[in-house]
Amino acid sequence: MKKTVITGIGVVSPIGIGHQEFWKNLVSGNSSIAPMECLDLSKYESKKGA
């Protein structure tokens, strides 16, 4: 059987790391969705990422 260790619980998202920063950006309507310019996405329909 494999063992699992949980070392912490928290929010890690494109709009914030930690619950305070995440919540502030969420209720403010901030979004991290934007055009992706660092990758070649020419063969994909969507050109946006978060």
Image: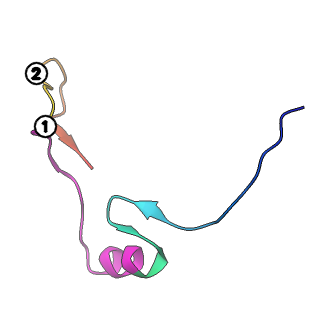
Place residue 7 in its image quadrant. bottom right
15 displayed left or right of 38: right
To which residue does mark 1 refer? Answer: 38
According to the picture, the residue beneath numbered tag 2 turns out to be: 42
Residue 48 location, x and y as percent? 18, 42
Q: Position of residue 50 (x, y in %)?
A: 27, 50
Give how far across and how far down residue 19 sits, in percent.
48, 76
- Which quadrant is home to the N terminus? top right
Which residue appears at 46% of the width and 61% of the height? 12
The amino acid type of the residue labelled 1 equals: Cys
Relative image position of residue 41 (x, y in whole percent): 15, 26
Reply yes or no: does residue 26 show up in magenta: yes
The front one of 6 and 13 is: 6
Category of crowding for the residue at label 2, using alpha-carbon neighbours closer than 10 angstroms: few (below 14), some (14–19), many (at least 20): few
Report if residue 19 lies within the magenta region: no
In the picture shown, does residue 24 fall above or below 32? below
Q: Residue at x 84, y 34 (%)?
A: 2
Mark 1 burial class by Cα count in 10 Å: few <14, some 14-19, many 20+: few
* Mark 2 residue type: Ser
Q: CA distance from mark 1 to mark 2?
A: 12 Å
Question: Which of label 1 and label 2 is nearer to you?
Answer: 1
Q: Quadrant of residue 37?
A: top left
Element at label 1? loop
Residue at far right of view: 1
Magenta highlight range: 21-37
